[in-house]
Amino acid sequence: MKKIFILLFSILFYSSLLFSQVEVSSRLQQAISEANPDDYIRVLVLLRDQVDVVAMDEQFYRESIPIPQRVTQLINQLQTKASETQVNLLSYIEEKTQSGKVFQYESFWIANLVMVEAKVEVINEIMFRLDVSQIDLDAILELDKPIEVIEKCT
């Protein structure tokens, strides 16, 4: 009986670790592999716990909530979620800032994420946090340039 319990516990424990892995973008993996240990890499860390915006939207329509109230409720929910769920991550990042391993960081509430510019060592540690869902390189976004200009017929 004891062996069965240990086996079941082990299966549950390892499956929870398997399913809670952080998704790391390929471009971040490449940046990490090319970086020196003393380089800082700027990343976006998306937390696992997000506001269910779709469910809120459905509720707003069901209850015919006026748009100004929708905006207020949504913003309050997003800000509350971020302030409640980012505490541990931000204190970890602040600790690493004091030791010089984090250059800068900024908390965002609209998508419950944190921008961190840190050494590879810190980014690797963040990858194993259970409260993190995804990590991606904070890249500069640019619009695609047109291939050719089509002249307007008059």
Image: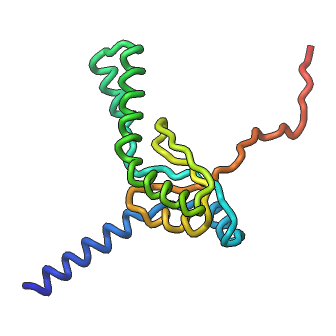
Picture residue at 59% right of the left edge, 63% below the top = 101
In the rendered image, the vertical position of residue 37 relative to residue 86, given as above or below: below
Quadrant of the frame with the N terminus: bottom left
Q: Check the image and report above or below for 85 versus 136.
A: above
Residue sitting nearer the eye, 149 or 91 = 91
- Expressed as whole percent of the image width and height from the top left, the position of residue 139 reads 68, 50
Position of residue 66 measured from the top left corner of the image (x, y, whole percent):
36, 12
Name the residue located 89 percent from the left edge and 29 percent from the top edge. 150
Residue 2 versus residue 104: which sits nearer the camera?
Answer: 104
Indicate the position of residue 98 as horizontal and vertical percent values. Answer: 54, 58
Q: Residue furthest front?
A: 98
Display colour scheme: rainbow
Residue 154, horizontal then vertical, whole percent: 92, 13
**Which of the pair 153/41 is nearer the observer?**
41
Q: How many marks?
A: 0
- Please state which of residues 139 and 99 is positioned toward the viewer in this rendering: 99
User: On screen, 7 above or below 128?
Assistant: below
Could you say which quadrant of the image residue 106 lies in?
Answer: top right
Classify 12 as above or below 63: below
Q: Is residue 127 left or right of residue 150?
A: left
Query: Quarter-wise, where is residue 53 in the image?
Result: top left
- In the displayed structure, does residue 19 sit left or right of residue 107? left
| Residue occupying the point 45% across, 58% down | 92
Rendered residue at 58%/55% (across/down):
136
Question: Is 2 left or right of 115, judged from the image as shown?
Answer: left
* Residue reaching furthest to the left: 1
